Amino acid sequence: MKTMAIIGSQWGDEGKGKITDLLGQKCDIVVRFQGGNNAGHTIIVGDKKIVLHLIPSGILHPHTVSVIGHGVVFDPLSFKSEFEEVRQSGVEINPNNLKISINCPVITSYHKLLDSGREGHADSTKIGTTGKGIGPSYEDKIGRRAIKTHDLLDKNLLKEKLTSILLEKEVLFKNLYHVEYPSLEDETERLFELGQFIAPYLTDTFSFLQDPSRRDKKVLYEGAQGVLLDIDYGTYPFVTSSNTSVASIYSGAGIQQHFVEEVLGITKAYTTRVGEGPFPTELHDDVGEKIQKVGHEFGATTGRKRRCGWLDLPLLKYSIESSKLTSLALTKLDVLTEVDELKICTSYNYKGEVIKSAHPGINLYQAEPVYENMEPFKDKFENAGDLSPQLKAFIKTIETFVEIPVGILAYGPERNQIQFLKDYF
Ligand code: GDP
Ligand code: IMO
Ligand code: MG
């Protein structure tokens, strides 16, 4: 196999970072193709915890080239502090192992102010965004007025583009959101300086990936967020502003092969969500609290408590269909061993009908989950391949329902707390 994608199959935070880090070890190139620093991908190595937001999770392996494709919205300020933090933890980063597309839309201070202004405004729908300016920056990209990463190198052009960006936003800052904002001159200086910092890493990443010399390279595409946060497939409007599904690889980075050979859907053995929006299997009881505590379910980017609930197979089936997932990695199994009951949602009662696969015609606020009670598993995961009958039954129920195999079991945050049931790369 030469190409593989890692896609979150729920509402994000499924454990993509850990799996990308592990599989990235076997790859030549790891590519981010959408999202921005709203992502928080955690990798635990011994007593070190590294949280990556913009830098691909392949960076820990010196032989792997990490690529930030043009589909990513790029905040140079956030990048600089992440870069310095990662370097301080002993990871080598240089222009040979990190390439940033010359064509990423840039997140400016104005985008971040607009994001928080909207979230705080009484008349806006509160989405519970990460506040990183993701939505406003994608708006400017689609509105054809984005500043691209290569624009940061030309001060005059940068000022010209910032002027046009500020033209409309200034009206909103002054008259609607009533917030202070940096002057055009200050913002130009700040971004130009950051441009100098990223200059050695700027690359035409599309051509880099297409180069014939890389035809035989193993490439791993690292998705951010999850399918249910996809701007088109997700629980709109409670979504992020990019396509998080596999389709984004083609528009957000480019691919040399004709298709992605394996699309691995990372799936928590239960479900979590940060921010607002429907969540049919959400728990509002002691069990939900226990899962939140035992699973340390706090957002890696904002520190917010994650909402927790049971695994939702109708929604998982929908994610699999919309992102053409070919196998699953089931993560955080260890967390469920601490809980004395185990449920799995196998259908919804929806307006008197039984729904087995979620679809965009369903108002999830009105979907009543129907559960199968499963026997809890108490595995200690000491011997590889030694799974209890209860855990086997849990996996079997999932596989039978979704009709794709579970290829990976993860049972702890560390690199070695994993079992491969299928060979990747
Ligand atoms: P991502 O956004 O999908 O990369 O996931 P996050 O890093 O935001 O959140 C996943 C959290 O679970 C992180 O703190 C990981 O260290 C941790 N984690 C990943 N896999 C497992 C697992 O199998 N068990 C446990 N207990 N923690 C895990
Ligand atoms: P990773 O890659 C979980 C959520 C936010 C909010 C919505 C919109 O770590 O899985 P945005 O700032 O993107 O405009 O917020 O999307 N969200 C995430 N939730 N994991 C993420 O990324 C997320 N990125 C965005 O909480 O509900
Ligand atoms: Mg995360």
Image (cartoon, rainbow, N blue to C red):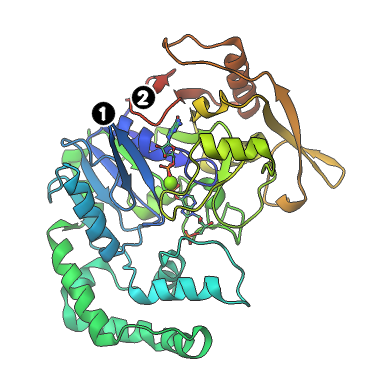
Q: Position of residue 89 (x, y in %)?
A: 20, 43
Is residue 20 depicted above or below 383 in this figure?
A: below
Is residue 40 depicted above or below 177 in this figure?
A: above
Q: Nearer the viewer, residue 116 or 327?
A: 116
In the displayed structure image, the side of residue 251 where residue 56 appears, left or right: left
The answer to whether the residue labelled 2 contacts the one labelled 1, judged by CB atoms less than 8 Å apart, is yes
Whether ligand 1 has any atom under 8 Å from the Cβ at mark 2 is answered as no
Query: What residue is shown at x 67% (from left), y 38% (from top)?
Result: 286
Indicate the quadrant where residue 23 lies. Answer: top left
Q: Is residue 402 visible?
A: yes
Is residue 249 depicted above or below 189 in this figure?
A: above
Q: Position of residue 377 (x, y in %)?
A: 59, 18
Residue linked to disc 1: 26
Q: Which mark is residue 424?
A: 2
What is the three-letter code of the residue carrying label 1? Lys
Query: What residue is shown at x 62% (from left), y 77% (from top)?
Result: 122
Query: What residue is shown at x 33% (from left), y 28% (from top)?
Result: 415
- Work out how far the residue at label 2 is from the one at label 1, CA to CA, in angstroms: 9 Å
What is the three-letter code of the residue carrying label 2? Tyr
Indicate the quadrant where residue 220 lies. Answer: top left
Q: Position of residue 253 (x, y in %)?
A: 32, 52
